[in-house]
Image: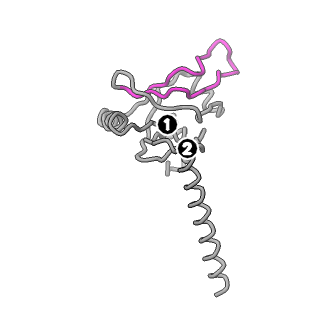
Amino acid sequence: MSQSNDRVIATNRQAKRNYELFDSWEAGLVLSGSEVKSLRESKVQITEAFGREEDNELWIIGLHISPYRNNPNFTHEPDRPKKLLLHRKEIERILNRLNRDGLTLVPLSLYFSNGKAKIKVALGRGKSDYDKRQSIAKRDADRETEKALSRKQREV
């Protein structure tokens, strides 16, 4: 997403808090026309979504795209599963890790890249409450260290 013509539609801010994230990929989505129009209006909820394997294909379940309101005759089912478009080798690598390591496919962000809807997905392992508290404590300690260093530099 380093190009300037990318436009972020939605991000899953809960993902970093609830999952320990590993490798990530950019994937295309199979969408209908009214779904794309709703995405252009940012009418989407990504936080409850997750990836699932069916017939050696990857699908995003729980990605809610609201119906396009300007034309009620041209609508779609808001919660239907959406197929991910990835290269076969990438799908095999993801499926291998999902089955072997017991990981989950977590969507991180949804955006337009060169006019095409893309989704960034990552493999993740769910964090327990203890892990969440530990990462919050580490983040706070790092923040305090940064503050102390910046104060020290101002004094010099």
Q: How many angstroms separate mark 2 from mark 1 (CA)? A: 22 Å
Question: Considering depth in this image, is 113 or 65 the residue closer to the camera?
Answer: 65
Pinpoint residue 68: horizontal percent, then vertical percent.
Answer: 65, 22
| Residue 15 in sight here | yes
Mark 1 falls on what kind of element? strand
Between discs 2 and 1, the one toward the N terminus = 2
Question: Considering depth in this image, is 127 or 154 the residue closer to the camera?
Answer: 127
46 relative position to 25: left or right: right
Question: Considering depth in this image, is 131 or 151 the residue closer to the camera?
Answer: 131
Give the residue pinned by disc 2: 18
What's the amino acid at mark 2?
Answer: Asn
Q: Is residue 53 above or below residue 147?
A: above
Q: Which mark is residue 118?
A: 1
Mark 2 falls on what kind of element? helix
145 relative position to 100: left or right: right
Q: Is residue 139 above or below residue 109?
A: below
Q: Residues within 10 Å of mark 1 (few under 14, many from 20)?
A: many
What's the amino acid at mark 1?
Answer: Lys
Residue extending furthest front? 130
The magenta span reads: 57-83
Q: Residues within 10 Å of mark 2 (few under 14, many from 20)?
A: some
The residue shown at (60%, 31%) is 39
For residue 142, what is the image quadrant? bottom right
Quadrant (top left/top right/bottom left/bottom right) for the C terminus: bottom right
Residue extending furthest right? 70
Pinpoint residue 70: horizontal percent, then vertical percent.
Answer: 70, 21
For residue 58, what is the image quadrant? top left
The residue shown at (58%, 24%) is 35
